Amino acid sequence: MATINRFEDLEIWQLARDICNNFFLITDRIPFNKDFSLKNQIRRSSGSIMDNISEGFEREGRKEFIQHLSISKGSAGECRSQLYRAFDRKYTTKDEFDEIHNMLILENHKIKYFINYLKKSTYNDVKYKS
């Protein structure tokens, strides 16, 4: 695997950014934008996916990175649940639901595989080098 020097280069972060942008677009439309509670919750949880990936990466410790990836994976699951609520309230079309749902499933798989890779890797933490 190539060395990654910036979190922006991680595919999982790029996908999380796309997910977050998609949620922003659908929550900005009427009637979704009037459901302030769900709109704010789904925006925060989708942002949490990308934010935890970046924060974990920047901490420069393998175990901390894995912990933040786990939180990010949980946020993606939370977004999926919220997406169902939005769909049930007719805030999204079936096509929008399917597209974002598939992105969230893919994101969870990618994060899971990346966590497994990091657990098996011989990557040494930068944080603890003298």
Image: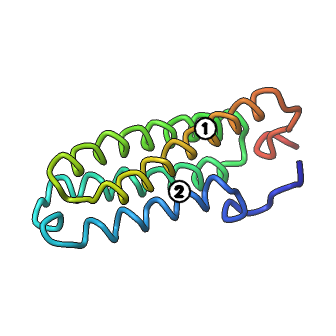
Query: Which sits in the foreground, 60 or 44?
Result: 44
Could you give the CA–CA distance between mark 1 and mark 2, rounded to whole angstroms?
Answer: 12 Å
Residue 44 placement (x, y as % from top left):
33, 55
Residue name at image x 57 percent, y 45 percent: 106
Most extreme residue toward the front is: 94
Query: Which sits in the foreground, 33 or 129?
Result: 33
Name which of mark 1 and mark 2 comes first in the sequence: 2
Query: Which sits in the foreground, 92 or 129?
Result: 92
Amino acid residing under circle 2: Ala
Residue 39 placement (x, y as % from top left):
22, 59
Residue 129 placement (x, y as % from top left):
86, 42
| 121 is higher (above) or lower (below) than 36 | above
Which residue is disc 1 drawn over?
A: 109
**Image quadrant in which the C terminus is located:** top right
Instruction: Indicate which label's residue lies in the foreground, 1 or 2.
Output: 1
Residue name at image x 22 percent, y 44 percent: 85
The reply, left or right, for residue 38 in relation to residue 45 is left
Residue 38 placement (x, y as % from top left):
19, 53
Mark 1 and 2 residues: CB-CB less than 8 Å, in contact?
no
The reply, left or right, for residue 60 in relation to residue 23 is right
Which residue is disc 2 drawn over?
A: 16
Residue name at image x 62 percent, y 40 percent: 111
What is the secondary structure assignment of the residue under circle 2? helix
| 71 is higher (above) or lower (below) than 21 | above
Where on the picture, by quarter, is residue 124?
top right
Label disc, if present, on residue 73 of the rendered structure: none
Where on the picture, by quarter, is residue 118?
top right
Q: Residues within 10 Å of mark 1 (few under 14, many from 20)?
A: some
What is the secondary structure assignment of the residue under circle 1? helix
The reply, left or right, for residue 126 in relation to residue 70 is right
Amino acid residing under circle 1: His
